[in-house]
Image (cartoon, helix red, strand yellow):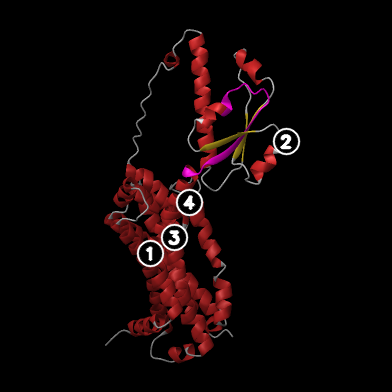
Amino acid sequence: MSSPAWVVFRKELRDTLRDRRTLVAMVVVPLLLFPLLMVGMAKFSQSRAAEARDKTLAVAVADTEASSGLAEFLRQEPGLEISEVQDVTALPERVRTEELDAAIVIPAGYGALLASYYPAPLQLLHKSSDDFDIPRTRLEQALGRFEQKLLDERLRSFGVEPRVLDPLDIQRTDVVSSRELFGKLLGGLLPYMFIIFCFTGGMYPAIDLAAGEKERGTLETLLSSPASRLQIALGKFAVVTLTGFTSALLATVGMYVSVAQGVEGIPPAVLSAIQSVLAPGTIALVLALLLPLSVFFAAALLMLSLYARSYKEAMSVISPLMIVVVVPAAIALAPGVRLGLVTAVVPVLNVSLATREIIAGTADPLHLALVFASLLLLAAGGMAACARWFSREDIVFRS
């Protein structure tokens, strides 16, 4: 004979899977979102960067002394369209309205300072753009080459070869592993996404299984069955936990499959490093972190839903809770925030930081053990509180 809690679980799971909104939130969105995000962001970033690199920049040069030679030098640079102007006052507005990509103003006294071997002033007018500021970078690189030309000429006039100014040939070697480098980058974003899916995946079933049943009048029917309050609570609780965890799991599967198959638009070297970061063992450890967090979320969601009088009230109460979940996950993105003895016991934040360390391969076993212990205590407390909530008549029959 089946346990009443198991019967309630199967009944509630079957009803939950019939709900289209739950299926979309739990299955479709997490399974497709990561591949679409990765492909879309890679293609968009590459196209914008390529467009900014290939664009011919319209640059105005205002040379009050007409003797700097800068305009002639820049005309030899590829991708620059140089025009010489006299009206300096109109240049800021022309750059602001993007009639010009940039402007260079060479003030009076430039030649005298340069001849006296003093730094000569030169003003670069530009407008910060959303094209990774590539236009400004391109122009600054061209100006750097012009500056190097002037320096070489000055040194040769002294009978000095320019290379004598470089007594050291520094060869840089970055000892950080590709896993640690990309793990720190990915590890900041991935737990943020996983935690959100974990929460939203259980949100709709929790609202429907408590507030929704109150509104439909079916909760009283279930309470009159041979199943005890505790068994009913456990059955519903297990369904909400399963849907939340499944949502995070499917998001992980979608991300892993898209990376394993190779996402078009991501450079092969970067893709290879990402694939090495997202090893099956790493993903399994991350999911192990998300399971007790799903239990805690399920308890909180089910308790709030049971307290609400209707589906609409439950939505209005639970929806703002997303901010409470997102803030600790977002704190983990801040520079300098690390997994330690204190942060390891802060809910949600500890999962974000531990996930980042696991993906980067730099997790401390003691800190991980503390994170797991705190999450398990949190999950157990949530389960106990949820069961106690179901035993209160003033909550269950609140109308």
Quick one: SS at disc 2?
loop
Residue at the image point whose x is 73% and y is 36% from the top: 89
The kind of residue tagged 2 is Thr
Task: Give the Cα separation between the discs numbered 3 and 2.
Answer: 49 Å
Q: Is residue 237 left or right of residue 125?
A: left
Numbered range of the magenta stretch: 54-71
Task: Give the Cα separation between the discs numbered 2 and 4.
Answer: 47 Å
Label 2 or label 1, whichever lies nearer to me, is 2
Task: Give the Cα separation between the discs numbered 2 and 1.
Answer: 55 Å
The kind of residue tagged 3 is Met
Residue 244, image x, y percentages: 41, 70
Above or below residue 98? Residue 10 is: below
Give whichever of 190, 42 is nearer the camera: 42
Above or below residue 363? Residue 113 is: above
Quick one: SS at disc 1?
helix
**Tag 2 and tag 4, C-beta contact below 8 Å:** no
> Which residue is denoted by mark 4 in the rendering?
332
The kind of residue tagged 1 is Ala
Label 2 or label 4, whichever lies nearer to me, is 2
Asked if residue 395 shows in the view, the reply is yes
Instruction: Tell me how many marks there are.
Output: 4
Q: Earlier in the sequence, mark 3 or mark 2?
A: 2
Where residue 234 sits, quadrant-wise, is bottom left
Task: Give the Cα separation between the discs numbered 3 and 1.
Answer: 8 Å
Q: Which mark is residue 251?
A: 1
Q: Furthest-top residue in view?
A: 159
Residue at the image point whose x is 34% and y is 83% from the top: 10
> Which residue is denoted by mark 3 in the rendering?
193
Asked if residue 388 shows in the view, the reply is no
Quick one: SS at disc 3?
helix
Residue 374, image x, y percentages: 41, 58
